[in-house]
Image: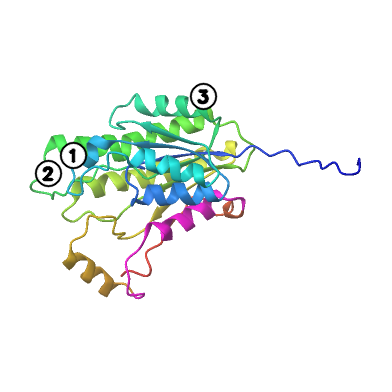
């Protein structure tokens, strides 16, 4: 080496993760994206502001911009993609944009959902169909698109999806999430030739703005640790599952809820 001359090690390219349902800065999706960025991933993420506008918490109009800025401050390239996942054409478009702008996707993390409370007697056919279009059909189409496009090294691919067992009084949401479980877990076997792992995480109740005071009090009392879950709690588990160290966890539905009974 010439005296006084320093040779830097070339920077290895960061792997690319696609995270769906990252529409609010306080959401689980944003927490997961931030944790992955800090762990060395580049991020494409989907958001759909029209969904938040019709929910009780309302829309954060600049959330996608703010989240992308936070990811870039953590060293990641960040690509927000607005997409209504009820549209069956959306998954292919999202993947194509992510690949064109960032490169091949190595990890798919599914945090999107449609969630409008209704029970067995008052759920409408239209609501049921939309819940299944977003929570089940879009999950299948995204997983399928990932499998068709994946060209990474065997053992490097990851699929992680968030689920829920809340069905009473929330029929179409819970039923759609039940379908999501089966779809994603099937990939652990069907994508074996690709060396892709697939897991489902049930984070339990995480207060991201949807709980009222009575709900918070009740759920704290039912949890041995005496607190509610946070996006950070879920993000740490997803980060592990997406890491090389998480490779041996495959085909599992994991409860990460602080021991909630």
Q: What residue span does the magenta drawing correspond to?
A: 224-244
Q: Nearer the viewer, residue 149 or 190?
A: 149
Rendered view: 96 above or below 195: above
Label 2 residue SS: loop
Whether tag 2 and tag 3 are in contact, CB under 8 A, the answer is no
Point out the image quarter for the N terminus: top right
Q: Nearer the viewer, residue 11 or 41?
A: 11
Q: Nearer the viewer, residue 38 or 180?
A: 38
Whether tag 1 and tag 3 are in contact, CB under 8 A, the answer is no
Specify few, some or many for label 3: CA neighbours under 10 Å numbering under 14, 14-19, or 20 or more. few
Q: Which of marks 2 and 3 is in front?
A: 3
For this orientation, the residue located farthest to the front is 4
The x and y percentages for residue 151 are 59, 31
Q: Name the residue under label 3.
A: 100
The x and y percentages for residue 18 are 46, 38
Considering the whole magenta stretch, tell me its main secondary structure: helix
Label 3 residue SS: helix
For the residues marked 2 and 1, what is the alpha-carbon distance in whole angstroms? 7 Å
**N-terminal-most mark, 2 or 1:** 2
**N-terminal-most mark, 1 or 3:** 3
Residue 33, numbered label? none
Whether tag 2 and tag 1 are in contact, CB under 8 A, the answer is yes
Q: Which of marks 1 and 3 is in front?
A: 3
Specify few, some or many for label 1: CA neighbours under 10 Å numbering under 14, 14-19, or 20 or more. some
Specify few, some or many for label 2: CA neighbours under 10 Å numbering under 14, 14-19, or 20 or more. some
The x and y percentages for residue 244 are 61, 50
Label 1 residue SS: helix
Q: Mark 1 points at which residue?
A: 128
Q: Nearer the viewer, residue 219 or 163?
A: 219
For this orientation, the residue located farthest to the right is 2
Q: Name the residue under label 2.
A: 123
């Amino acid at each position: 080496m010439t005296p006084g001359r320093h040779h830097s090690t070339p920077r290895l390219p960061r792997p690319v993760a696609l995270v769906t349902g990252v529409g609010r800065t306080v959401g689980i999706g944003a927490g997961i994206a931030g944790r992955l960025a800090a762990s060395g991933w580049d991020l494409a993420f989907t958001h759909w502001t029209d969904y938040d506008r019709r929910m009780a918490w309302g829309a954060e109009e600049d959330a996608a911009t703010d989240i992308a800025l936070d990811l870039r401050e953590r060293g990641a390239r960040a690509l927000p993609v607005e997409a209504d996942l009820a549209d069956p054409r959306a998954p292919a478009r999202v993947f194509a944009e992510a690949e064109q702008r960032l490169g091949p996707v190595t990890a798919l993390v599914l945090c999107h959902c449609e969630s409008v409370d209704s029970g067995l007697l008052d759920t409408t056919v239209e609501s049921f169909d939309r819940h299944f279009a977003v929570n089940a059909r879009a999950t299948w189409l995204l997983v399928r698109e990932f499998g068709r496009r994946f060209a990474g090294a065997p053992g490097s691919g990851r699929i992680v999806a968030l689920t829920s067992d809340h069905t009473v009084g929330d029929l179409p949401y819970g039923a759609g999430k039940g379908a999501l479980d089966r779809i994603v877990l099937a990939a652990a076997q069907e994508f074996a030739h690709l060396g892709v792992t697939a897991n489902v995480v049930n984070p339990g109740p995480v207060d991201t703005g949807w709980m009222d005071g009575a709900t918070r009090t009740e759920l704290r009392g039912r949890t041995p640790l005496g607190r509610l879950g946070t996006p950070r709690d879920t993000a740490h588990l997803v980060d592990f599952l997406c890491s090389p160290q998480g490779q041996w966890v495959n085909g599992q539905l994991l409860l990460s809820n602080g021991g909630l009974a």
